[in-house]
Image: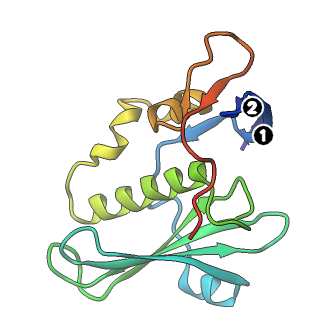
Amino acid sequence: MEFIDVRLTMPDGRILHRRMPAVVEKPDPTAQLVDRAVFDRETKQKLISTPGLVKGHSGTDLWYMRQRPDHYYVLHIKLSGGLLQTGRDIFVRSICTWTPTLGIDAFDQCLVIDIEDAVLLNAAKRPAPRLAIFNQNSRLGIIDYMIARGLLAPDTTGASDGIITSPLFITS
């Protein structure tokens, strides 16, 4: 994965430089699966537990996997019947661009939600409206993605790549 230096204008006018992926890939849940045995033996920290989003989804746990240098997130998506298969757990990987010392970063959270929706909607055999921002594209440039997700506004002054419109960090 290629990373680039992104210049972001903070609400107070300061410019923040941050290394971010050059592009955001449309989530493919099957390509990002994590084996349960691998998940169980790795060093991890539970960050968030969320309730189910659709019938048959009993909830999702988000784990920060603290391997160095390749730290990442794993979503433990718990399926419990209904439209989805009974008693099946899905473990899916998401990138981590910012160490979650104050909670998950807003950008990383957008990626996590995209993956969760793709998994659930794939399992339920329904369209994935959240992923409509990709249209027919398999990827979006980082700035276009952040603007589409409401994290940035275009910086018409050219001083930066975008103006932050949302808090960068979400504390749990």
Q: Nearer the viewer, residue 23 or 11?
A: 11
Rendering coords of residue 152 (x, y %)? 56, 31
- The residue sitting at 75% across, 16% down in the picture is 159
Tag 2–tag 1 contact (CB < 8 Å): yes
Residue 90 falls in which quadrant of the image? bottom left
- Residue 77 appears anywhere in the view: no
Q: CA distance from mark 2 to mark 1?
A: 5 Å
Q: Work out which residue is located at the far front of the displayed protein and give it.
A: 12
Q: Which residue is mark 1?
A: 18
Rendering coords of residue 96 (x, y %)? 67, 58
- Residue 5 appears anywhere in the view: yes
Quadrant of the image for the N terminus?
top right
Q: Which residue is mark 2?
A: 6
Q: Amino acid at mark 2?
A: Val
Mark 1, secondary structure of its residue:
strand
Quadrant of the image for the C terminus?
bottom right
Q: Residues within 10 Å of mark 2 (few under 14, many from 20)?
A: some
Q: Amino acid at mark 1?
A: Arg
- The residue sitting at 36% across, 43% down in the picture is 131
Q: With 66 as the anchor, is 64 left or right in this view?
A: left
